């Protein structure tokens, strides 16, 4: 079944003060990689730290009556939230009571804890980020993180020494415990030798007394070949996953980066849908199409997707440090403190 999507609104979000500088005067860029909607507020995260005691890589603002409310902007500065580095995606539990956040899990030093905070899974009651907790906590050299989950991910990926988590969502369990799904974008020998992926790992979980605990094994439940198709010319990798409770389906956001002759990168991505029945059977997803009947191609790099209602999605883009934006986002240039977004209407 063909699903149609069109961009009906674009804009920029001010993520921190203009001209904010990091240590030694380095420029700070808004590189938003995650978004979730809890029914009243959109919660965002940057995959790069935002410096300052009163700032954080995680922030939120109201989305009500079909509009963003910039005056409600708030940083989430709980120590655990500030400690995590390289956020990649958020999930909302099916009952809407908890937010779960994951980092990339794409770097580690065997003999040092210096990079352990790149390996974090956090959860907190919706609207109470000050009560954030580490899931599956472990401590080494004074650093507490979710580093133990690396073994679970690697085992589910046939022992892969390198992988990158970029997606997170939660599925209702019915008579079984709910499942937390992790989207895998890269798999390989190292961060320099890998292949793009559209793989999803699942683990059942329970939350009791605000603490999330896993039940049983982590297993690879979905694996789709991201190689180019007749209608899609690029090799893509997962950049976000989302469960759409309105239509009981999965949404898969993918992106690509391809070098060009002038040394720059061609950025873009696609949005896909798959029914839960087809997802469970590991069948191919279907790309959303534009009004011309061709797959809707984002010309900026999509990093996060959130369901707003039955017919609207919120998508955030991260073009890394590039300030120029393509024609789906207006204006055509962002400032370093700004993050581009788009709202999609679905048919």
Image (tube, rainbow, N blue to C red):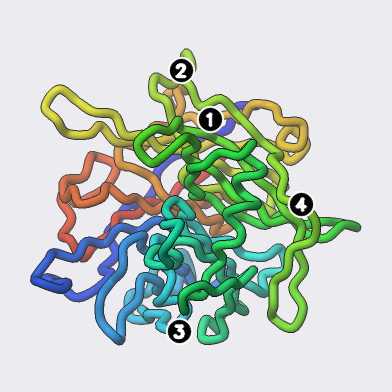
Quadrant of the drawing holding the N terminus: top right
- The reply to whether discs 3 and 1 touch (Cβ–Cβ < 8 Å) is no
Residue with the most extreme left position: 25
In this figure, which residue is indicated by the disc labeled 4? 217
Q: Secondary structure at mark 3?
A: loop
Kindly identify which residue carries mark 1: 287
Left or right: where 255 falls relative to 138 = left
**Mark toward the start of the polypeptide (3 vs 2):** 3
Q: Nearer the viewer, mark 4 or mark 1?
A: 4
Q: Position of residue 19 (x, y in %)?
A: 11, 71
Q: Residue 186, can we see it?
A: yes
Image coordinates for residue 317, horizontal then vertical, percent: 34, 50
Check contact, mark 2 vs mark 1: CB within 8 A.
Answer: yes
Q: CA distance from mark 3 to mark 4?
A: 30 Å
Q: Is residue 184 above or below residue 146?
A: above
- Name the residue that disc number 3 marks: 78
CA gap, disc 4 and disc 2: 37 Å
Task: Say which residue appears at 57% left-offset and 54% top-offset.
Answer: 150
The residue tagged with tag 1: helix, strand or loop?
strand
Q: Position of residue 167 (x, y in %)?
A: 53, 50
State how far apart marks 3 and 2 are (Cα).
45 Å
Residue drawn at point x = 19 percent, y = 25 percent: 260
Q: Earlier in the sequence, mark 3 or mark 4?
A: 3
Residue 281, picture quadrant: top right
Q: Position of residue 10 (x, y in %)?
A: 32, 52
């Amino acid at each position: 079944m063909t699903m149609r999507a069109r961009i009906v609104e674009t804009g920029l979000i001010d993520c921190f003060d203009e001209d904010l500088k990091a240590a030694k005067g380095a420029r700070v860029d808004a590189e938003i990689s995650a978004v979730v909607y809890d029914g009243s507020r959109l919660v965002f995260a940057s995959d790069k730290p935002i410096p300052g005691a009163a700032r954080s890589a995680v922030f939120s603002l109201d989305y009500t009556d079909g509009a963003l409310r910039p005056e409600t902007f708030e940083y989430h500065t709980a120590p655990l939230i500030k400690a995590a580095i390289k956020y990649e995606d958020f999930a909302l539990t099916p009952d809407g009571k908890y937010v779960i956040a994951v980092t990339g899990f794409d770097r580690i030093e065997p003999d040092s804890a210096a990079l352990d905070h790149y390996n974090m899974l956090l959860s907190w009651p919706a609207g109470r980020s000050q009560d954030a907790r580490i899931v599956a906590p472990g401590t080494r050299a004074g650093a507490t993180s979710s580093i133990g989950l690396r073994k679970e991910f690697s085992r589910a990926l046939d022992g892969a020494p390198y992988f990158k988590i970029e997606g997170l969502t939660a599925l209702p369990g019915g008579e079984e415990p709910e499942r937390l799904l992790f989207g895998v974008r890269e798999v390989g020998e190292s961060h320099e030798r890998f292949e793009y992926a559209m793989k999803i790992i699942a683990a059942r979980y329970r939350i009791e007394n605000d603490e999330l605990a896993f039940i049983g094994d982590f297993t690879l439940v979905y694996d789709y070949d991201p190689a180019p198709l007749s209608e899609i010319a690029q090799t893509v990798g997962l950049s976000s996953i989302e469960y759409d409770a309105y239509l009981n389906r999965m949404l898969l956001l993918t992106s690509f980066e391809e070098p060009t002759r002038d040394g720059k990168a061609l950025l873009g991505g696609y949005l896909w849908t798959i029914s839960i029945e087809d997802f469970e059977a590991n069948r191919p997803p279907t790309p959303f199409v534009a009004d011309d009947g061709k797959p809707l191609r984002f010309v900026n790099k999509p990093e996060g997707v959130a369901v707003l209602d039955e017919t609207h999605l919120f998508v955030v883009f991260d073009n890394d440090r590039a300030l120029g934006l393509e024609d789906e986002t207006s204006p055509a240039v962002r400032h370093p403190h700004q993050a581009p977004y788009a709202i999609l209407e679905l048919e």
